[in-house]
Amino acid sequence: MPNTYLKYYLYPDYVVEHSNPDHTRANEVIAGREKTVFSMAKTIIENGTSEGCEFEMGAHATFVVDLARAIAFNTHERMLLIVENNGTIANFDDNAMVEVPCIVGSNGPEPLSQGKIPEFQRALMYQQVTVEKLVVEAYIEGSYQKLWQALTLSKTVPSAKVAKEILDDLIVANKGYWPELH
């Protein structure tokens, strides 16, 4: 199944080579979608109405509406959602969050069984889930070591040395927003 995130996991060197550190994905969103949404919201507030405003919804907004409709009207629509595994992928951790096809109705998502997945995909997913769990543990415990481990395991970071450099830079850049790490 194609996934745009695979380029980060499988070709991080390519992504880095073609990235502009002075214009990141965050900058793209701020200059693009965020600017459009905030500008439209300002216009609606100033006019006191949304009539006459042309606003093109993006894929995420459309998806949210489709999801709400499926729950409200019990449509049993098939959607790709992130849910707790609970056996949906037979050879993967039950408590891991996985993105799988689900049937959605008034009872919420009902994940469709995927059976066992190939070893390569399972290992790639396990590595990413471990990164995410370590980040959460690092936040809760204020653990520098666990956050360093998480970055080191990330497929987007080439080594423990680079992970430490990134972490130290992130601590400085996020001072006042992050818990103190020890």
Image (cartoon, rainbow, N blue to C red):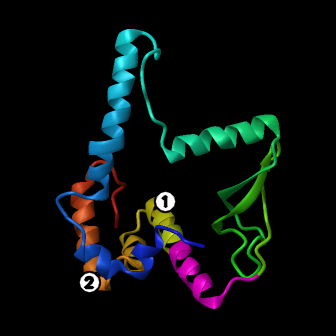
Q: Label 1, secondary structure: give it.
A: helix
- In front: 166, or 121? 121
Q: Nearer the viewer, residue 22 or 49?
A: 49
* Residue 84 placement, left or right of 156: right
What residue is shown at x 34% (from left), y 54% (from top)? 178
Q: CA distance from mark 2 to mark 1?
A: 24 Å
Q: Hey, what amino acid is under mark 1?
A: Ile
Residue behind mark 1: 140
In the image, what residue occupies the spot 53% across and 69% down?
133
* Residue under the point 29% across and 51% down: 28
Left or right side of 3 for 68: right
Q: Amino acid at mark 2?
A: Lys
Q: Magenta residues: mostly which secondary structure? A: helix
For image coordinates 43% across by 16% down, the residue present is 52
Quarter of the image with the N terminus is bottom right
Query: Horizontal and vertical percent for residue 3?
Result: 52, 69
Residue 17 horizontal side relative to residue 118, left or right: left
* Closer mark to the observer between disc 2 and disc 1: 2
Residue 168 in the image: state x and y as whole percent: 24, 68
* Residue annotated with mark 2: 161
- For the magenta stretch, what is the residue range? 116-130
Earlier in the chain: of badge 2 and badge 1, it is 1
Within 10 Å of disc 2 (Cα), the crowding (few <14, some 14-19, many 20+) is: few
Report if residue 3 lies within the magenta region: no
Q: Quadrant of residue 150?
A: bottom left
Of residues 57 and 134, the one nearer the viewer is 57
